[in-house]
């Protein structure tokens, strides 16, 4: 599992770096095109929105891995250590359930809940319907190469990150739960940021 986790981490870092660079490059070239050449690409805004959504969904799981999600833990740290550890385990379990339920809520019907659907079901519906995005279109060479007879980019391609991101989030939450149980990690959120902030600014008033 450690090797798989390391490979996923490298993939996450590479994809996040690519997405951030792509958003920056597209935004920069659009500003130059609009204000210097009085032109631009009509699908640029929609593409940056899609890339930004991908970056957020990828960032959820990466934030769990790096322990960079912010959380208010001042109250639970007042508990005795066994109780605090139990709350950390409970929080990790809640995160796992959050990711799994958003992926697919159909299984909750077996527990008596009136729920259905989820990211997988929504993505599959987009795949079956085959509708396109608003502004993004396939290049002509791409349509000829793959025999695509549709102008607009399929919406299911852009929405693929929704189930993938939630699956990664659930996996990282499970990984964090195991680390908490083994004592390798305290909580699923960032370290006690209040104490760190006080320590960093301890000498501010003296100055």
Image (cartoon, rainbow, N blue to C red):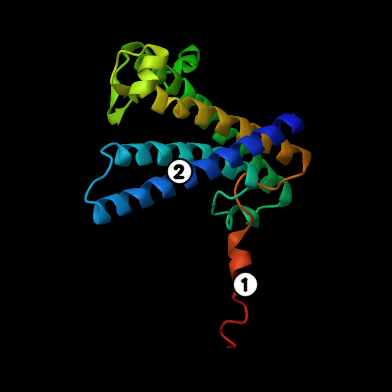
Residue 117 percent across, percent down from the top left: 40, 18
Q: In what quadrant of the picture does the N terminus appear?
A: top right
Q: Nearer the viewer, residue 6 or 137?
A: 137
> Who comes first in sequence, dot 1 or dot 2?
2
Where is residue 61, by image quadrant? top right
Residue 129: give x, y in percent of width and height: 31, 13
Q: Are there few (<14), some (14-19), or many (20+) residues within 10 Å of tag 1?
A: few
Give neighbour class at mark 2: few <14, some 14-19, many 20+ (Cα, 10 Å).
some
Q: Position of residue 53 (x, y in %)?
A: 41, 38
Which quadrant holds residue 62?
top right
In this figure, what is the number of numbered marks? 2
In front here: 2 or 42?
A: 42
Q: Residue at 66% x, 53% y: name it.
A: 79
Residue 74 left/right relative to 103: right
Q: Which mark is residue 130?
A: none
Residue plotted at (47% across, 29% down): 161
Helix, strand or loop under label 1: helix
Determine if residue 168 is in view: yes
Element under disc 2: helix
Q: Position of residue 200 (x, y in %)?
A: 62, 72
Residue 117 visible to an observer of this rendering? no
Considering only vertical position in the picture, is 146 above or below 67?
Answer: above
Q: Nearer the viewer, residue 40 or 73?
A: 40
Q: Is residue 155 left or right of residue 83?
A: left
Residue where numbered disc 2 is placed: 22
Circle 1 residue: 200
Q: Residue placed at 55% from the left, 38% from the top?
A: 15
**Quadrant position of the C terminus in the picture:** bottom right
Residue at 42% of width from left, 48% of height from top?
25
Mark 1 vs mark 2: in front? 2
Name the residue at the left extreme: 38
């Amino acid at each position: 599992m450690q090797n798989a986790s390391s490979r996923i981490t490298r993939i996450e870092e590479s994809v996040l770096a690519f997405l951030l660079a792509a958003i920056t490059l597209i935004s920069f070239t659009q500003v130059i095109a609009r204000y210097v050449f009085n032109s631009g690409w009509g699908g640029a805004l929609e593409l940056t929105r899609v890339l930004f959504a991908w970056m957020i969904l990828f960032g959820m799981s990466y934030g769990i891995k790096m322990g960079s999600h912010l959380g208010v833990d001042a109250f639970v740290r007042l508990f005795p250590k066994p109780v605090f550890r139990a709350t950390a385990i409970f929080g990790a379990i809640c995160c796992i359930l959050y990711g799994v339920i958003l992926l697919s809520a159909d299984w909750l019907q077996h527990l008596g809940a009136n729920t259905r659907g989820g990211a997988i079901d929504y993505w599959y519906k987009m795949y079956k319907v085959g509708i396109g995005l608003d502004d993004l279109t396939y290049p002509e060479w791409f349509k000829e190469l793959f025999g695509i007879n549709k102008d607009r980019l399929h919406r299911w391609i852009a929405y693929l990150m929704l189930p993938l991101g939630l699956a990664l989030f659930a996996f990282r939450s499970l990984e964090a739960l195991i680390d908490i149980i083994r004592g390798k990690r305290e909580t699923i959120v960032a370290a006690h940021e209040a104490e760190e902030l006080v320590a960093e600014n301890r000498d501010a008033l003296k100055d």
